[in-house]
């Protein structure tokens, strides 16, 4: 959590940093700050609240200078306040930090014993004091002072540091939290992810854990430079990669919220995730990125999927496909639960880590455990070179483009796409699917963008239904089979952004408890397309109606029986059964969006949440 940006160039740094932070606000948004070197010293402006407050503060007190660092915060140590906002300053040093310093209590005590006075409750301020102390004790440069200080620190961090005595230099380091360099013309930047830097360059250098980098802005005679070393002082080269995301992909593009834009981008995200990966002629999937040759694919005894939140729901749909199409036993586990019980991994397991950000702490920790036990790991992530793909043996990137809304939408359906590809690949290699079956499944996948466009055409009708849910304090979502995870996802979307209590349930479980809740005040959203379990789910609808529950149904066009039972019906196109989860989730995303929007909530940045959860 937390986002950092650094800029060293020829333009005014503050607006560039604030603009970069705007792209990172999804990582945290309880306070923000910026520090700029104006050639004489460092000026800092910080503000409590969203970035807008910082923009206003900077407008009132313009910062001159072409080198600076900035931060947007999601509080871990110390409540959200201006004092706890970054940058933190000690002597001539200013620091921004993403991560957690685990030995902060001992270090704080040591520094206090030396006479240091703290002005915040944060762990980050310790780094500022350590670097300041190293400089006062004779470190030759900021680079050396930061190196010496980080040797005393344990935990996870990405940091960027300024020194009032070095007006052209930013020192940055990465250990467990992401940090990317952007190499522009006459400017060099660093940031927590590429979206913060894209307005300036597409040439990115992804730092590795343990990298320490000195960024020097352009001088009168020389252009900008980046010097990278390991913590032990060994020079290292990291390749520059050209990114194919465009800056406009991280803009709202005429939509009121990023979430709505991202819901509408799903057809493109799915098509892009399929592109170049399928072989329709042979009814197969090109498996190179999956990192499993046919022999290894046949040797897999179990698939074990690890994920959190929305990605966990995608994983549950994935299990359905893996078992149905590849006939491979599949376990799905929450990242946080893997570390809370003695999970068992085998060398012939394929562990699939599903994570939009590629950084989620719990998923990452579980992947490390699986890898240590000798399992093969495949990462499904949307963020190039993020921590989880770096650890994995294979990476199947979703190509959803940057997802800014905290509530995940297009990454969910892109994850489904990736998991369907893996399922067909394993099915083909393991002999569970022949070429015709593979081809027909893939043709179904290729048709999904068209079906979703059709559903998006009915968005206004979903908005009307949302009006009837604005005052609901509880909503129940029911689904069966592969639509059970979609019920979970529909409920998660609604609670995340509308703050209403919502629960997803397997429809077959209704009579084992939740039926007690049903009365005329409880809206029940039932996912009931015409599929193999349609009649059973229709039975649930009748049970809800018998108790005067209000039914909002997702049903296949032409379903007369549903027509007579439900208060509202969102019609689904007739589509092959295996692609239905792609379609049933879209109206539920829209429903959550319109309820939250109608309530006037900050849909893209819901309270208490952050998009990337890098803490346990
Ligand atoms: O980056 P990840 O996919 O690993 O994130 C997992 C969850 O934190 C995430 O899906 C979260 O539940 C979203 N806010 C859902 O909209």
Image (cartoon, grey):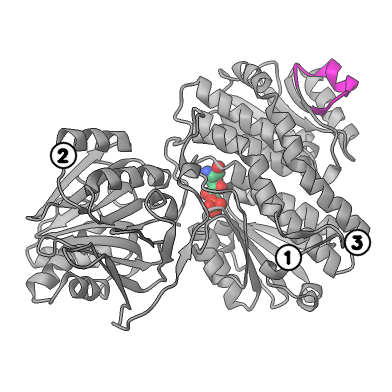
- Answer few, some or many: residues within 10 Å of disc 1's Cα (few below 14, many 20 plus, some between 14 and 19): many
- Percent of width and height locating residue 329: 79, 63
Magenta run includes residue 4: no
Question: Which residue matches tag 3?
Answer: 435
Q: Which residue, given by chain and number where applicable, does mark 2 sit on?
A: 62
- Label 3 vs 2, first from the N-terminus: 2
Give whichever of discs 2 and 1 has the lower sequence position. Answer: 2
Q: Is residue 296 left or right of residue 282?
A: left
The C terminus lies in quadrant? bottom left
Camera-side residue: 95 or 614?
95
Mark 3–mark 2 Cα distance, whole angstroms, equals 65 Å
Separation of residues labelled 2 and 1 (CA atoms): 55 Å
Q: Residue at x 74, y 61 (%)?
A: 422
Quick check: 119 left or right of 15?
A: left
Q: Which residues are magenta?
A: 555-569
Residue 294: x %, y % from top left:
79, 75
As rendered, which of 525 and 200 lies closer to the eye? 200
Viewer-side residue, 342 vs 426: 426
Which residue is drawn at the image coordinates 28% and 82% (left, top)?
A: 233
Q: Position of residue 200 (x, y in %)?
A: 37, 52
Q: Are marks 1 and 3 in contact (CB under 8 Å)?
A: no
Q: Of label 1 and label 3, which has the lower sequence position?
A: 1
**Residue at the outermost front position:** 221
């Amino acid at each position: 959590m937390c986002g950092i940006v650094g800029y060293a160039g020829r333009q005014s740094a503050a607006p560039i940093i604030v603009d970069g932070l705007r792209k990172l606000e999804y990582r945290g948004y309880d306070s923000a700050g910026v520090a700029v070197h104006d050639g004489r010293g460092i000026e800092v402006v910080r503000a409590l609240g969203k970035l807008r407050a910082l923009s206003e503060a900077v407008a009132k007190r313009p910062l001159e200078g072409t080198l600076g660092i900035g931060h947007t915060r999601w509080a871990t140590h110390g409540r959200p306040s201006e004092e706890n906002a970054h940058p933190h300053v000690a002597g001539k040093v200013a620091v921004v930090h993403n991560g957690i310093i685990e030995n902060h209590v001992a270090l704080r005590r040591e520094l206090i014993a030396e006479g240091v006075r703290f002005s915040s409750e944060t762990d980050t301020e310790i780094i500022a004091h350590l670097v300041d102390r190293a400089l006062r004790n004779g470190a030759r440069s900021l680079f050396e002072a930061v190196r010496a200080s980080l040797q005393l620190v344990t935990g996870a961090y990405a940091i960027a540091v300024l020194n009032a005595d070095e007006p052209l230099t930013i020192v940055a380091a990465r250990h467990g939290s992401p940090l990317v360099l952007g190499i522009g013309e006459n400017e060099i930047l660093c940031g927590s992810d590429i979206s913060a830097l894209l307005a300036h360059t597409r040439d990115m250098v992804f730092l590795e854990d343990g990298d320490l980098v000195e960024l020097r802005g352009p001088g009168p005679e020389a252009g900008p430079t980046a010097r990278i070393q390991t913590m032990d002082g060994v020079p290292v080269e990291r390749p520059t990669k050209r990114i194919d995301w465009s800056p406009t992909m991280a803009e709202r593009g005429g939509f009121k919220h990023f979430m709505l834009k991202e819901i509408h981008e799903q057809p493109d995200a799915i098509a892009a995730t399929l592109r170049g990966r399928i072989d329709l002629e042979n009814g197969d999937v090109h498996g190179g990125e999956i990192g499993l040759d046919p022999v290894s694919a046949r040797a897999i005894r179990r698939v074990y999927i690890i994920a959190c939140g929305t990605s966990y729901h995608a994983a549950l749909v994935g299990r359905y496909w893996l078992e149905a199409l590849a006939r491979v036993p599949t376990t799905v586990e929450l990242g946080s639960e893997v570390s809370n019980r003695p999970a068992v991994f085998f060398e012939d397991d394929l562990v699939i880590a599903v994570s939009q950000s590629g950084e989620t702490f719990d998923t990452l920790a579980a992947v490390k455990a699986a890898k240590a036990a000798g399992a093969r790991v495949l990462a499904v992530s949307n963020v190039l070179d993020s921590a989880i793909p770096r650890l994995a043996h294979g990476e199947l990137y979703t190509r959803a483009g940057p997802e800014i809304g905290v509530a995940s939408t297009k990454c969910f359906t892109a994850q489904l796409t990736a998991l369907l590809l893996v399922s067909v690949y394993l099915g083909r290699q393991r002999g569970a699917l022949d070429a015709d079956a593979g081809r027909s499944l893939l043709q179904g996948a290729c048709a999904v963008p068209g079906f979703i466009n059709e559903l998006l055409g009915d968005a206004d009708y979903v908005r009307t239904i949302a009006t009837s849910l604005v005052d609901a304090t509880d909503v129940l979502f029911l689904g069966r089979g592969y639509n059970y995870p979609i019920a979970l996802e529909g409920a998660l979307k609604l609670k995340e952004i509308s703050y209403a209590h919502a629960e997803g349930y397997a429809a077959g479980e209704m009579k084992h408890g939740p039926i007690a809740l049903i009365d005329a005040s409880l809206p029940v959203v039932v996912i009931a397309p015409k599929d193999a379990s349609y009649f059973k789910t229709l039975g649930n609808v009748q049970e809800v109606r018998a108790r005067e529950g209000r039914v909002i149904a997702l049903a296949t066009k032409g379903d007369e029986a549903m027509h007579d039972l439900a208060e509202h019906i969102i019609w689904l196109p007739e589509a092959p059964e295996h692609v239905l989860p792609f379609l049933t989730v879209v109206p539920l995303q829209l429903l959550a969006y319109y309820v939250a929007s109608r309530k006037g909530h900050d849909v893209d940045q819901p309270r208490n949440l952050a998009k990337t959860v890098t803490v346990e």
